[in-house]
Image: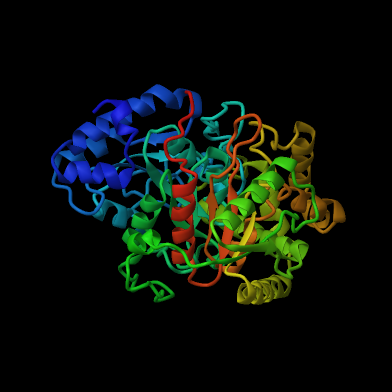
Amino acid sequence: MEYGEYRKYDAVGLAELVARGEVSPGELLETAIDRADQVDGRLNAIVRRMDDLARQQTAGELSGPFAGVPFLLKDLSQDYAGVATGSGSRALRRHAASRHSLVVRRWLDAGLVIFGKTATPEFGTKGVTESKATGATRNPWNLAHTPGGSSGGSAAAVAAGVVPVAGASDGGGSIRIPAACCGIFGLKPGRGLVPAGPDVAEPLSGAATDGVVSRTVRDTAAMLDVLTRTPDLGGPYLPAVPDTSYVELAKRTPMRLRIGFTTRSPLGTPVHAEAVAAVEQAAALLDGLGHDVQPAEPEIDGVALARDFMTMWSAQTAATIERIKQATGARNRDFEVDNRLLAASARAVRAADYAASRERWNVHTRALAAFHERFDLLLTPTLAGPPVRVGELTTPPLLRLGGELLLLLRLTGPFTRTRTWNDQVLANLEQVPFTQLANLTGRPAMSVPLYRTADGLPLGVQFVAGLGGEATLLALATQLEAERPWADAEPAL
């Protein structure tokens, strides 16, 4: 199949061609491989190729709703037995997974043909996809800019037409941020809906979840059906999956929705005029579609939420580094200094203070639930501004050297209790202050690609739903997709 024909179809469409015998899985795979060969030298989206394993798949019998469709995993937590899960870290480049993670098993059972793993920052801890181990990943719409993170490799590959849908995950915005940067669709499912096993019960204390980024809403809906229809009997929850498939629910015209919108950063930090315009244009579009749209926001202390998020994030980073050291014999120098400082800051937190921070998640969740008693959805920018340039958020050399010195002299404990450190921690969220709310509260949220900046860069808007609101989000996204189609937009690589 020629690339131009391949690019016309989403994953559901390609699966239909295979089912009708109009194209073979092997032909689709070679087209995807050729496209990756053509563009990835400029993007650096795929960090691990699995072409031979994929060819072995296509030589056998494939079944399932996505039989024969090429697919990429995110190189973080999405383990493929016998293949290294590098997690963007030098410490894990050669540490092969012993078994498939549950989401990978379900994708294979759905017939997807996996031929690679995509770039992520080390341990997914940044909103840009730049790591010492694998280098910087670039945005297909402008190679000088980031595709976001931490699922930036997957988003770049989808936007560039390598695959129509790819594996992603979201612990603080990592599906929605790259979707917003790359002009594609990204849905973060609610807590517990997508199984995380077998090696993890609740990643990031339940704040993180696996999912996908895609060009079309129906691909995401169909993928959600693949991941959720069978319960994980070893998991912590039996999620309330609707009797009707998400594919069918996504097709339903949404009722008249009450939508509250805000462009104010919860941190009180600046929001770029383009991000404000993106929300205002979305609000006008929604009003024109008959929805009740008005300015409103939940009564949440955004700074307190950010601090509670970073307390958990730092603690998880510390636990991850220690686990890897024990499993692989890795040394401190094998980890990036930013993550070593995060880990050090976690060690300075008393257990009682961590427990108190974790308990405050309930305060934030109840406040958002109160908002959703008045409004079906919250609309915000996904990002506080257009996608930043590659390297723009890199820690300056002098600060990095200072961090190394603090670590060497074991002075990080006192330093991480200073106002300077706490201010720096919050500054790291200044570009992405809107996304952590859905993670801490466990609510579903999506980024929809409705806006382009004056420079032609995508800039998505975010919708946050109440508990169990995935169907509402998908139905609205389908309506918006029909009104402002985006799937055929293609960067001029």
The relative height of residue 335 versus residue 235 in the rendered view (above or below) is above
Examine the image and state in which quarter residue 198 appears.
Answer: bottom left
Q: Residue furthest right?
A: 419
Examine the image and state in which quarter residue 233 appears.
Answer: bottom left
- Who is closer to the viewer here, 87 or 452? 452
Q: Which residue is pictured at 30% across the width and 68% down the height?
A: 230
Residue 435 in percent (x, y) is at 62, 56
The relative height of residue 354 versus residue 474 in the rendered view (above or below) is below
Q: From where the camera sits, is residue 122 visible?
A: yes
Q: Which residue is pictured at 74% across the width and 48% down the height?
A: 430
- Who is closer to the viewer here, 91 or 159? 159
Q: Which residue is pictured at 66% across the width and 38% down the height?
A: 386
The relative height of residue 335 versus residue 208 in the rendered view (above or below) is above
Examine the image and state in which quarter residue 268 appears.
Answer: bottom right
Q: Is residue 312 left or right of residue 111?
A: right
- Who is closer to the viewer here, 243 or 196? 243
- Who is closer to the viewer here, 438 or 306? 438
Residue 115 in percent (x, y) is at 32, 38
Q: In this view, does 303 lie to the left or right of 132?
A: right
In the rendered image, which quarter contains the N terminus?
top left
The relative height of residue 64 versus residue 40 in the rendered view (above or below) is below
* Colour scheme in use: rainbow
Q: From where the camera sits, is residue 84 visible?
A: no
> How many labels, in total?
0
Residue 26 in percent (x, y) is at 20, 34
Residue 324 in percent (x, y) is at 51, 52
Q: Is residue 97 left or right of residue 398?
A: left
